[in-house]
Amino acid sequence: MREFCQHLLDSSGFPPRWQCGSWSPGLGWLHIAADLGVWSAYFVIPCVLAWYAVRRKDIPFRGVVLLFVAFILLCGLTHLMDAVLFWWPAYRLAALLKLATALVSWATVASLFRITPHLMALRAPSELDAEIGERRRAEQDLRVLQASLERRVAERTAALEETEERFRAVFEATPAGLILADRYGRIVLVNDLIVRMFGWEKAELLGQPVERLVPERFRDRHPAYRAAYFATPAERPMGAGRDLAGARKDGSEFPVEVGIRPVGMSGAMYVLASVIDISTRKQAEANLRASEERFQAFMNHAPLAAWMVDEEFRGVYASPGFDRLTGLSPGSLLGRTPSELFPAGVAARHTANSNRVLSTGLPVGDEEPLVGLDGFPGVAYVVKFPVRGPSGQTLIGSVAIDITERKRTEELIKASLREKEVLLKEIHHRVKNNLQIVSALLELQSRQTTDRAAVEMFRESRGRVKSMALIHERLYRSLDLARVDFAEYTRQLAGDLFRTYKVSGDIRLEIDVDIPALSIDIAIPCGLLLNELISNCLKHAFAAAADGCIRVALHRERGTNVVTVADDGVGFPAGTDFRNSTSFGLQLVNTLVEQLAGESVMTADRGTTVTVRFPGTPSSNLEGPNP
């Protein structure tokens, strides 16, 4: 190969072209310049074509273009070699270049013949312009269609987004926990309520098996249940008669209700589970059962009977005590009216009271007859009251207690009280008669002396005895043997004193008594007190006056009795010590005030006014005269 190249480049034996023929310098250089110009052009043209062919992979007839590149480049090299021959006569190399040029040229010719049919099939520029116009119109139509499609896609996307947003809102707002799982038990979607209910984050649940939410003691069996469900999928409502439990993240269990239904999406089967935490309901049910058990235990042991009837008086409920009260089983009341269970008189009383409850809407308490186990006519205290039924209807509830023994005891007590009342009336009557005898004896004794002081003393004693006798007289004439109508007593006592002291008609008596009846414990000392105060007025206030007025008032002020006796007479002498007087009458007044646990005030201004205040019940630790 080296020898071939040396031989090819060997120019010995050949003269330079300047020496062949008669070349003038001008003609020679003209040939040289022309050949170099052709060579430079033939060098640039294939370079541009080669660059174009390399950069554009999609040009047609790429091989022909490359042949043209080689053909033009070789043609340029032959022209370059012709210019070089003027100095270096390498005719062998020049011949080889021309041979290569000829071969490439004929290869190009052959390629042109091969592609000529294809070139003839190329359309004319006018056709291309028409096609370009058509394509442009098609492109415009496509752009319009694309814009319409994009608008419709945007609208459809917005609608889908809105639908998805609504679905999400409904999914999250559902008042139950929702779980969407595939047929393999993998969790696809959960709402926030499931997260709060089970204590997991959504990311911790998505893609995980639903057994993560099942108590550990059931997890091994749950896949079999799931497979059986997908074999025959069907909607199962909430509860479905099963007690189910869920497991929180911390392992704690809580009762749930689960409703499931199959859902088909994108050709695949899913299951949607609705989960409700029923812990509160279960606790309420337990509390209700406990309450019912306590109520039933209470009704079983309570010494009373309870029952309910509807608006037609047909029984709807009866407690166990109904048997003990009436001798009828609780079941015998159900659906039956009183007239079907009891004698006519007993049934009529029950029906009348039930009608009162319906008409007034208020509870009614009454003693109703009953027939006990032994057939003995008894009495029950029955309270009937309206009850609003579960459907809004009005029921009548009844609670009854057997008071037969109590009524028997009451009758015995009433009979005993009647006997005691007769005896007490007789005692009051005899005490009053004995006091009148004492008063008569004092009257007879006073007639045996001429001593005015002694006569006055006897008269005062008679007044005191008569005031006590008057109390007993009013008691045995009254229906209330323990209390005295003090208003009438005061009028009668004052009248008797006026007659005893033979008061002239010019002395007026004004009585204002507004006080409840007083017990005998208060009435006797209070009567003696009035006797002393009115007697003092009659004896001392009007000795030198022809007329005057005595005012007697008794009132109750905030639980305190107030007694006021006043006159417009001469009054007590100045300097009189009312509380430390040597007068027996005033001493008795002070003693009676102490016995009543009260306090007294005396004023002497245009007469004398004595005011005594004492509580409604006398103090039990104070001692006074025992009349």
Image (cartoon, grey):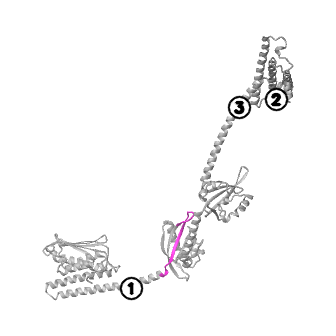
- In terms of secondary structure, where does tag 3 sit? helix
Q: Nearer the viewer, mark 3 or mark 2?
A: 2
Q: In this view, does 469 lie to the left or right of 111?
A: left
- In terms of secondary structure, where does tag 2 sit? helix
As drawn, 292 above or below 237: below
Picture coordinates of residue 624 (x, y %)?
26, 82
Label placed on residue 63? 2
As drawn, 436 above or below 578: below
Quick check: is 389 in the magenta stretch?
Answer: yes
Residue ID for mark 3: 141
Badge 3 or badge 2: first in the primary sequence: 2
As drawn, 30 above or below 403: above
Residues rendered magenta in the picture: 387-405
Q: Disc 3 residue type?
A: Asp
Q: Which of marks 2 and 1 is in front?
A: 2
Mark 3 closeness class: few <14, some 14–19, many ≥20 residues within 10 Å: few
Label placed on residue 419? 1
Picture coordinates of residue 341 (x, y %)?
58, 75
Picture coordinates of residue 50 (x, y %)?
77, 27
Quick check: is 135 in the magenta stretch?
Answer: no
- In terms of secondary structure, where does tag 1 sit? helix
Q: State which quarter of the image contains the C terminus.
A: bottom left
Residue 505 in which image quadrant: bottom left
Picture coordinates of residue 106 (x, y %)?
86, 24
Label placed on residue 86? none
Mark 1 closeness class: few <14, some 14–19, many ≥20 residues within 10 Å: few
Residue 595 in which image quadrant: bottom left
**Residue drawn 49% across and 80% down?**
404
**Residue drawn 73% across and 50% down?**
267
Q: Disc 1 residue type?
A: Glu
